[in-house]
Image (spheres, helix red, strand yellow):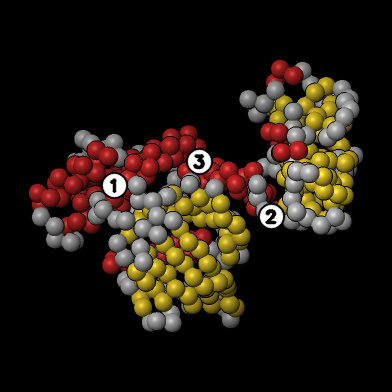
Amino acid sequence: MEIRIRGVSKHYYSEGKTIKALDGVDLTIAANQIFTLLGPSGCGKTTLLRCIVGLEAPDTGEISIGGQTVWSKEKNISIPPEKRGLGMVFQTYAIWPHMNVFDNVAYPLQVRNVGKDVIRERVANTLRFVQMEGYEMRPATKLSGGQQQRVALARALIAEPKVILFDEPLSNLDAKLREETRKELKAFLGNLQITAVYVTHDRVEALALSDAIAVMRAGQIVEVGTPQKIYFNADTRFVADFIGRANLVKARVRFQEGDRTVVECGLGTIACERRDIPVGNEVTLCIRPEFIHVAKGEGSGENVVNGRIDSQVFVGEAYESEIRVGNELLLAKIDPDANLKAGDPVNFRLDAAHCLLVSI
């Protein structure tokens, strides 16, 4: 189901102050995709999710799900959460400790007075889908964090919702289990072919899971796009910096040349992928560390930058190195076999396709 959000605002009042959690949000979430709301703590992403599910009432605006208006201030429409046809997985999972796996998963059907035979069949099918078959009688307190996450997912799916919402469901797992569960979750949701709205502040999680990402800041949608668009071709400095590690260098546009925009900055004269920015404007040059391929000694030529290794930290698969170029300090990843150390002169050539210009 498609979700349409128009002009949604939400304010909270505390100690005589007004806190603007959502500020006129306009957003369309296409049907049958994994859509992630990404942003720092306090940006409004969880508030927006709770407005969609009906746990919060916006102050202004309209929300429709599958063509049905579920909230409208102007039209005085307010459909309660239980009638919106949604499933939700919370950050804490909300697994009831006094119930076993079967009863936890069956609960949404039991409160709807569904017949016992139907419940038994659907619980079995759903647990099979999330790879928890055979755990029906296991007490909830005897489950690992990853198993609890699967039970929470099964309980959200048992009522066959058209939309399922996730509020940072992997944040309580350790790093290795989070990575494994992320892969499983993407596979589960891909097989279901339903709309999933996912909230996280973890950029890796957003990039790995999503068909589309909306980056939020201070209650507003800053940018929407595919993971590849957001990571490689962001429009703003905030998004480029938030979505991944980036070297951000102040620059000024010198001239446009075919499919390239040439800028002057602390690295010298650099040809970048073309952006239609007026000559003379100040911009930010964004270079990802993985696109800085370092060679020993000095070099020359277009987009070749000379510098010196300022510091290095070994992180296993690479050295994370800081390269001093004049007053600029750039992060790069250097192969452990490169035999380079702090103080060594180095050079690297920047590919124009990987030199992104964003707003300052």
Residue 359 in the figure: left or right of residue 93: right
In front: mark 1 or mark 3?
3
How much space separates mark 1 and mark 3, taking CA atoms? 21 Å
Element carrying mark 2: loop
Q: How many marks?
A: 3
- Say whether disc 2 or disc 3 marks the residue closer to the N-terminus: 3
Give 234 or 122, whichever is nearer the viewer: 234
Residue 300 in the figure: left or right of residue 180: right
Quadrant location, the C terminus: bottom right
Q: Amino acid at mark 3?
A: Ala
Residue 292 in the figure: left or right of residue 164: right
Residue 212 in the figure: left or right of residue 192: right
Q: Amino acid at mark 1?
A: Ala
Q: Position of residue 103 (x, y in %)?
A: 20, 50
Q: Position of residue 166 (x, y in %)?
A: 41, 53
The residue drawn where x is 53% and y is 68% is 25
> For mark 1, does the 10 Å Cα neighbourhood hold few (<14), some (14 to 19), or many (20 or more) residues?
many
The residue drawn where x is 60% and y is 78% is 17
- Let me know if residue 202 appears in the view: no
The residue drawn where x is 85% and y is 55% is 279
Residue 174 in the image: above or below residue 93: above
The outermost residue toward the front is 258
Give 218 or 24, whichever is nearer the viewer: 24
Residue labelled with disc 2: 236
Q: Amino acid at mark 2?
A: Thr
CB under 8 Å between discs 2 and 3 = no
> For mark 3, does the 10 Å Cα neighbourhood hold few (<14), some (14 to 19), or many (20 or more) residues?
few
- Say whether disc 2 or disc 1 marks the residue closer to the N-terminus: 1
Residue labelled with disc 3: 208
Residue labelled with disc 1: 154
> For mark 2, does the 10 Å Cα neighbourhood hold few (<14), some (14 to 19), or many (20 or more) residues?
some
The residue drawn where x is 44% and y is 45% is 170
